[in-house]
Amino acid sequence: MNKYEKLSLKQLQVLITAASVRVDMYSPVYKTHSEEALEDLLRERQRKLNVAFEWTPENCEKLLYLNQQLIECWEMLHEEARQTFDTIKKRIDASDKFLTDFDLEARITFHLTDVEENDIGEILEDSIPELGVNHYSYNREACFDENLYLDRNHNWNHDHWFQGKFDDHFISQALHDLYDHTYLSFCDILKIDELWGEVKVDYQHCRKLKK
């Protein structure tokens, strides 16, 4: 990481854009800019922006607003997933002609707007790993009462970044995942303009073949 520490944000952005270009395996660019190098560049960019982030009352309010929206979105997803699970399970329990199993996933995805120029926003979106994936299936006990994203016992308000600014508030696991499990800086997070809650179901039919 030291080799990137002295670079400016503009220099980092140029390298990130170059490193994200997909080229064939025989290209010198491919050998120079590996996935590991891209991750290091994104992490250094995140660090620089977070160190310079201004914890103004306005920015704190924006983070609390996003935090609340994440909580409400997860509450809706949680209830929708529970109802969907129960409906499909009843079909299987009643020896449904088609259904023998299913996979159900609940997740939230994000959209960033006007992060920076040079397509850095798209690169950041592509770099976000799958966050908040709750998976349930018929053959695995569904523990709907153990949703980490709604567990009030997991309060991240004392994280070192916050320096006591949210002592009287609940900071959810979802917000923690955004700033700690991705390459998004707090500046980027404040520019999230859409949350997409998704409940996805794969309906499955299986039959044993006689040998």
Image: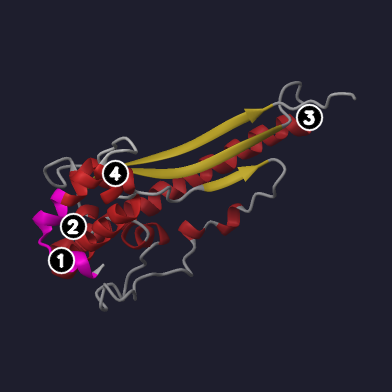
> Residue 96 appears at what percent x and percent y?
75, 25
Most prominent secondary structure in the magenta stretch?
A: helix
- Mark toward the viewer: 1 or 3: 1
Q: Which residues are magenta?
A: 2-14
- Identify the mark at residue 30; answer none if there is no mark: 4
- For the residues labelled 1 and 4, the Cα–Cα distance comes to 33 Å
Quarter in which the N terminus is drawn: bottom left
The residue where tag 1 is placed is 53
The residue where tag 2 is placed is 187
- Mark toward the viewer: 2 or 4: 4
- Three-letter amino acid code of the residue under disc 1: Phe
Residue at (65% x, 34% y) in the render: 102
Residues under numbered marks 2 and 1 in contact, where contact means CB atoms less than 8 Å apart: yes
- Ranked by sequence position, the earlier of labels 3 and 4 is 4
Quarter of the figure with residue 175:
bottom left
Residues under numbered marks 1 and 4 in contact, where contact means CB atoms less than 8 Å apart: no
- Ranked by sequence position, the earlier of labels 3 and 2 is 3
- Identify the mark at residue 94; answer none if there is no mark: 3
- For the residues labelled 3 and 4, the Cα–Cα distance comes to 55 Å
> Residue 138 appears at what percent x and percent y?
69, 40
- For the residues labelled 2 and 4, the Cα–Cα distance comes to 30 Å
| Label 3: how many Cα within 10 Å (few below 14, some 14–19, many 20+) | few
- Ranked by sequence position, the earlier of labels 2 and 1 is 1
Residues under numbered marks 2 and 4 in contact, where contact means CB atoms less than 8 Å apart: no
- Three-letter amino acid code of the residue under disc 4: Tyr
- Identify the mark at residue 153; answer none if there is no mark: none
Quarter of the figure with residue 84:
top right
